[in-house]
Every structure is written in structure tokens, then in C-alpha cells.
Image (cartoon, rainbow, N blue to C red):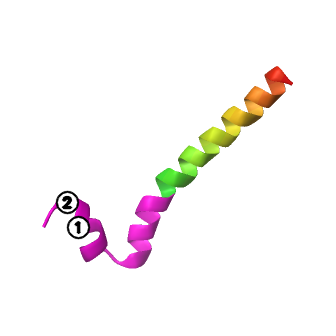
Amino acid sequence: MTKNNELFTTMPVGKAVAKLAIPTVVSQMIVILYSLADTFFIG
């Protein structure tokens, strides 16, 4: 079993979703902050 499959086969669903969702939320927050700053300085 490879490490990529380990997340989906051994972890509970809640923990697996949280492990994947947290980096996604953080990256989306960074994109939103960049967009707001860009709008403020350009607009």
C-alpha cells in the first residue's frame, strides 16, 4: 500500500476530509486577501 492510498483507506472519514480541507481553505484565504489588496491598490 502506498502512502497516497493510506489517507483514504485507514483514516476515519472526518479526519481525512479535514486533512484535505484545511490546506484548501488556507490557500483560498490567501487568494482572497491578494484579490482584495489588488483591488484596493489598483482601483
In the picture, residue 12 is in which quadrant?
bottom left
Please check the rendered image and state whether residue 14 is part of the magenta-colored stretch, yes or no.
yes
Residue depicted at 40% across the width and 71% down the height? 15
Magenta range is: 1-21
> Predominant secondary structure in magenta?
helix
Residue depicted at 56% across the width and 53% down the height? 25
Residue under circle 2? 3
Disc 1 vs disc 2: Cβ atoms closer than 8 Å? yes
Q: Please tell me the numbered disc located at residue 6.
A: 1
Residue 24 relative to residue 35: left or right:
left
What's the residue type where badge 1 is placed? Glu
Quadrant for the N terminus in the image: bottom left
Tell me the SS state at disc 2: helix
Please check the rendered image and state whether residue 2 is part of the magenta-colored stretch, yes or no.
yes
**Furthest residue toward bottom:** 12
In the picture, residue 38 is in which quadrant?
top right
**Label 1 vs label 2: CA separation?**
5 Å
